[in-house]
Amino acid sequence: MSSQPSSEKALGVYLRNARLKLDPAALGFPVIRRRTSGLRREEVAQRAALSVTWYTWLEQGRGGTPSAAALERLAGALMLTDAEREHLFLLGLGRAPEARYRQTMDVTPRLQRVLDRLDPSPAFIRSATWQMVAWNQAATELMTDFASLPPEHRNILRLIFLDPRSRILHPDWERTARFIVSAFRMDATRAGATDAIAPLVAELCAASPEFREMWHDRTIHTFEHGAKAFHHPIHGLQTFEISTFAVDGRPDLILVVYSPVA
């Protein structure tokens, strides 16, 4: 019976399978004199800045527990997707990798069609930094014409603190603002986007004393997912139930739907 831990053997199999899927020519390696498809072990080790011996041991299931840094380099060397990278960490360390924030400003046509079909319920997709990425017509009518704004200005915190119309839209403005600041901080931290939000935070602190006070207030503010009132610019006072959903395959995005309450 083998004395190798099953996790080490599974990691080795996973690395080997990922290696064999890569195209040597596309990565600048010669394709002659290859008995099998994919990269050689020494080529993966070179791309990941690891010793050939240790990488070989990893594939053989006897390399021990790799560090998170080594797994990150292997994920890059093997050109793993986010989902594949997460699985690599689960095999190698028994946990998911730390959050890796990526700024995104677009969605697939499929996701836009989902938003459009939710109309007349306002619906939008935001990033972990509360940047508006996509929306439907009902969201435009309720909140603002996002398409007319420069992309860098399509941020929910900008609307809340710098657009005077937000105080009309939200009858409970202060409660809403405190929740959004608290949730924004937690989402950015969870996504590993602390550095990315620093310019926005500095700008809002300078432009809005209310934001500055709320940002330095470390109290966690929650918002029950019940009914919330909005003052629609055309239809007057309306009540919506707010629901949030993770976007499949896009851990950096959140779908938000406002369902009208009769």
Image (cartoon, rainbow, N blue to C red):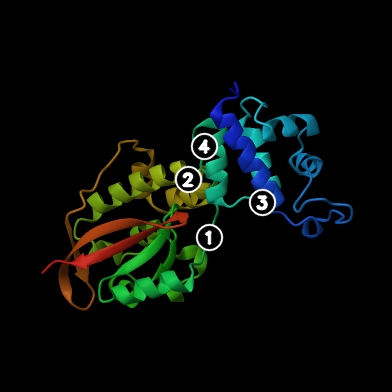
Task: Write the residue at 79% across / 34% down.
Answer: 52
Q: Residue furthest front?
A: 1
Real-space Cα distance between discs 3 and 4?
17 Å
Residue 15: percent from left, percent from top: 65, 41
Task: Write the residue at 51% across / 37% down.
Answer: 90
Is residue 228 found left or right of 5 in the rendered image? left
Real-space Cα distance between discs 1 and 3?
19 Å
Provide the secondary structure element on which disc 2 rests: loop
Residue highlighted by disc 3: 79
* Badge 3 amino acid: Met
Task: Write the residue at 68% across / 53% down.
Answer: 21
Residue 107: percent from left, percent from top: 48, 67
Real-space Cα distance between discs 1 and 2?
13 Å
Q: Nearer the viewer, mark 1 or mark 4?
A: 4
Residue 104 has which mark?
Answer: 1
Quarter-of-image position of residue 75: top right
Real-space Cα distance between discs 1 and 4?
25 Å
Q: How many marks?
A: 4
Provide the secondary structure element on which disc 3 rests: loop
* Badge 4 amino acid: Leu
Residue highlighted by disc 2: 191
Badge 4, how many Cα within 10 Å: few under 14, some, many 20+? some
